[in-house]
Amino acid sequence: MKTSLIDGKKPPHFDKHIIGNILLDVAPLAEVREEPMLIGVRNEAGEIYRLIGAAKLNSYMNAVEELLDLGLVDELENLEEQKEGCDAIFSEE
């Protein structure tokens, strides 16, 4: 899986746990956006500050599981469509 921070967006206090718990390769934002499944993570200001891109469904599901384990909430959990270009968007709620 690939990840990139979005320029100008402040990472939240829990960002180090995301990096520590999910095996991610840092890549340019444009490269991450090319992945078939995208997960956005919001900071305290409600902005998506990090994108995680997964090529395979099992990688995507593993990332979702890890983010849920960190106590984050997927605001798109009950939606079928994408929002802001993401298949899942996690935040502290």
Image (cartoon, grey):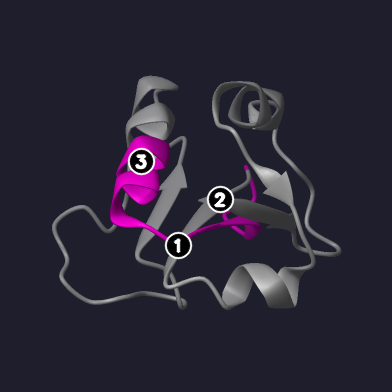
- Give the residue at mark 3: 64
Q: Of the residues shown, which amino acid type is indicated by label 2?
A: Met
In the drawing, does residue 43 fall left or right of residue 16? Answer: left
- Quarter of image, res 8: bottom right
- Give the residue at mark 1: 55
| Element on which disc 1 rests | loop
The circle on residue 1 is 2
The mark closer to the camera, 3 or 2, is 2
> Percent from the top left, x then y, of residue 27?
76, 59
Q: Earlier in the sequence, mark 3 or mark 1?
A: 1
Residue 51 drawn in magenta: yes
* Residue range (magenta): 44-63
The circle on residue 9 is none
Q: Residue at x 46, y 76 (%)?
A: 84
Mark 2 is surrounded, within 10 Å at the Cα level, by few (under 14), some (14 to 19) or many (20 or more) other residues, namely many
Tell me if residue 72 can be seen.
no
As rendered, which of 64 and 36 lies closer to the eye?
36
In the drawing, does residue 8 fall left or right of residue 6? Answer: right
Q: Of the residues shown, which amino acid type is indicated by label 1?
A: Ala
Q: Residue at x 67, y 32 (%)?
A: 15
Q: Is disc 3 in contact with disc 1, using a CB cutoff of under 8 Å?
A: no
> Percent from the top left, x then y, of residue 68?
34, 30
Q: What's the CA distance linking mark 2 and mark 1?
A: 7 Å
Work out which quarter of the rendered image holds the C terminus and state it: top left
Residue 21 drawn in magenta: no
As rendered, which of 64 and 10 lies closer to the eye?
64
| Element on which disc 2 rests | loop
Q: Is disc 2 in contact with disc 1, using a CB cutoff of under 8 Å?
A: yes
Tell me if residue 19 can be seen.
yes
Q: Residue at x 63, y 26 (%)?
A: 14
